[in-house]
Image (cartoon, rainbow, N blue to C red):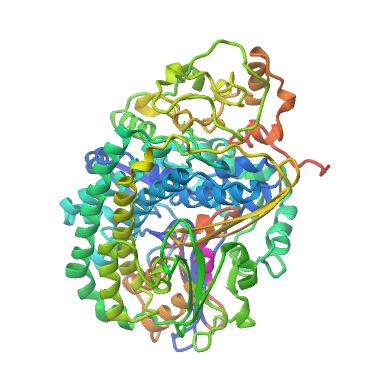
Amino acid sequence: MKQIILQPVTRIEGHAKVTIQLDDQGNVADTRVNVVELRGFEKFCVGRPVEELPRIVPRICGVCPWAHHLASSKACDAVFGVEIPPVAKKLRELAYMGHFIHSHVLHFFVLSGPDFVMGPGADYTVRNVIGIAQKVPDIARQVLRTRFLGQMMTQILGGKAIHPDVSVPGGWSKPVTKEEVVKLKEMAKECLDFATFAMNFAKKDIFPQYLEVVKSYAPISTGFLGMVQDGALNLYDGNLRMMTADGKYEDFPGERYMDHIAEHVEPWTYLKFPYLKKAGGFSMALDKPVGIYRTNSLARINVVDRIPTPQAQAELEEFRKNFGRPAQLTLLYHWARLIELLYAAERAVELLADPGITDPNTRKAVTPRAARGVGVVEAPRGTLIHDYETDEKGLVKDVNIIVGTTHNNAAINMSVKKAAQDVIKNGKYDQGLLNLVEMAIRAYDPCLSCATHELDGRIPVRVNIVNHAGEIVANLVD
Amino acid sequence: MVRVASEWLATCGGCEITILDIGEPLLDLLPKLQFVHMPVIMDHKYYGQTGEMEFNIPEADVGLISGSIRNEENAKVAQEMRKKCKTLVAVGSCANFGGIPALANMFTLQDMLDTVYRKTRTTVPADNPSMDITPLGDRVYSVSEVVKVDLGLPGCPTTPELIAQAIVALLEGKPFSLVERSVCDDCPTRREKKAVSSLKRPLDRVEFAPGQKYEDVRCFMEQGYLCLGPATRTGCGGTDKVPRCIRAYTSCRGCFGPIRAGANPMVDMMGALSSVGLDPRQIEDRMATFNRFVGVVGRLRPVAVR
């Protein structure tokens, strides 16, 4: 028995390590993605005034702070029992679209892109964004600029791009001015142009090269969870839709999440495993998984009936023609992410065209009370649930948070196992093949900071390669 | 060519995104920098690319560390970075003062694990995970409590401007230091040195008109909304100078940490509140509020449950 440890897993958000165990023949017996950190937000938010939580919880994740900021604001709205003004909803969603642009561009081009642009087996010293900048400097400049524009849109709207505090219980703190709208429109238009370019570039120069890989790579079959508004894609608001692997689905309001989801604990990772309660159990067996569902871009693209913006809808139709519904191939997460990038840019342009966006009445006053409130949004990395309970002074008594990446914990572990089994044969492996294993993780764009909000914020995915005597033969750790 | 190694410990990644937020000027800086280790963007592994060697980080001229120290592995990485980097920079409030994760220092580790693995609403209760994973420390530590740090860039997150200025100063071998002034010193709102009401929680909007010049808006603290500006180091506004949270018409919560090393924000705030005629005793959850980003410096500790 030999063990390979991959640590740290790189070009993901946060810390993980992968442990791969080999049998006597040098084939993969087992793998584990260990998440080694925990920060304990669910504990240390207790006792705080609940209106402070939207300002505290963004620190769960600096890559997707807006997701936590908005889920938290929505949970607070529910705790205070307030219906926020229509313009506040629009501003929250508009800022969120800017945020999605930043996050999806970052993931596709900066984190995952090097595997596709430089090649999965390229030397690690050039298999990164700096390598891309040398190989295709014009595209790299555009990438950095578009991500920056998305980020700056959120800064104009909220004063601060990372760890914002502009969304408050009862609405939104900073009305947008007409001058700002003029600037934002130009920025959104430029983002839309880039999103259109990115989709076409990927369909022409990237995906075709890897289509065979995509179709044979680490297949697993799972259910999917995502948000829909009247059946259509919406990232800020709507009901949740849980789809099983056969394509059947059930819609339910976010606050009923406990009827559908439970969390299982494994002894070798700090990260919990949410599963579908109705399946009656939890198993990550590759041949017969039980209770496993996935979130994030591919899940959303699978559960929606349609996308309410024209370019993204056309892409959805083409995607479905090629891959069916639900599409199970893990690497299609990247394709789905680009469809969403288009949607986010189109939706930003739409929201900015609404003359009501400059309405100054963005906020309602709220009064503390004892209550429970649930807030749900689609984070870039999947369905995000914040659930708060307060005492009569409005101080927090109980917090439960389930983040996008956590839903994917089981699926990530399954994909890694399948990928490792497929690429490591008879004890032969090299850095390029091991990178293929890591690509199974990267496809999910995991955010281990988010996932380990519980205590200290890292998912170690460690790949240990162990021989059957239990000796570690190699380990790969970021 | 300056060799750069970058690591993140118990962190959220916000400071790494801030480096990207330098924007296109970053492309001009890149040719002068050689990244030898940076898990977020490049695939260098601790144990070699196929796990063939002992734990190691390559030697570098400059080391950037974000995040606080929460587990044994964080401490090990910090020590390795110190050993291999000529100049070590602590980036962001977690690395410098513990940051938001240090709020956990108000609870015992056992209490926290009980909550996460046995008491949250959806969890099927189980023992604490302990196989193959690094143990958590007794509390959160800042990086400078564990290794010597040469330079600290505060903020949650810190700013693109500060990171760029620090990198340029290091490239040119020039000194770099932070200003010792408060957020109020850079805040454009109008002050009359006297509060208009008693302290209230931020459950309603501050008084302002959309598009109105900040100079015509009354100081939020004088309007009765607690603001940690008086006890917090300035710099969050970057080139624009206007403090980030003030731009959103929300009060400062102290993310840049104390105005100077060794200052105690809690004591400074008590004085600032009294000087405009507000009563600090009206504040709910005082300890955690005044030490929100500086739990390590302000020494947040477990308290007996009332």
Location of residue B179 (image quadrant): top left
Residue A217 location (% of width, % of height): 35, 80
Residue A397 is one of the magenta-drawn residues? no
On-image quarter of the C terminus of chain B: top right
Residue A407 is one of the magenta-drawn residues? yes
Left-right relation of B6 to B184: left
**A67 over A440 or under it: above or below:** above
Residue A221 location (% of width, % of height): 45, 82
On-image quarter of the N terminus of chain B: top left
Location of residue A451 (image quadrant): bottom right
Span of residues in magenta: A403-409
Residue A71 location (% of width, % of height): 53, 52
Counting every numbered tag in the picture gives 0
Q: Nearer the viewer, residue A165 or A74?
A: A74
Left-right relation of B297 to B106: left
Left-right relation of A161 to A292: left
Q: Nearer the viewer, residue A4 or B129?
A: B129
Residue A260 location (% of width, % of height): 61, 72
**A126 over A159 or under it: above or below:** below
> Can the viewer see residue B139?
no
Residue under the point 72% across and 46% down: B107
Residue under the point 27% across and 80% down: A322
Residue under the point 19% across and 63% down: A201
Q: Nearer the viewer, residue A146 or A238?
A: A238
Left-right relation of B22 to A416: left
Q: Main secondary structure of the magenta part?
A: helix
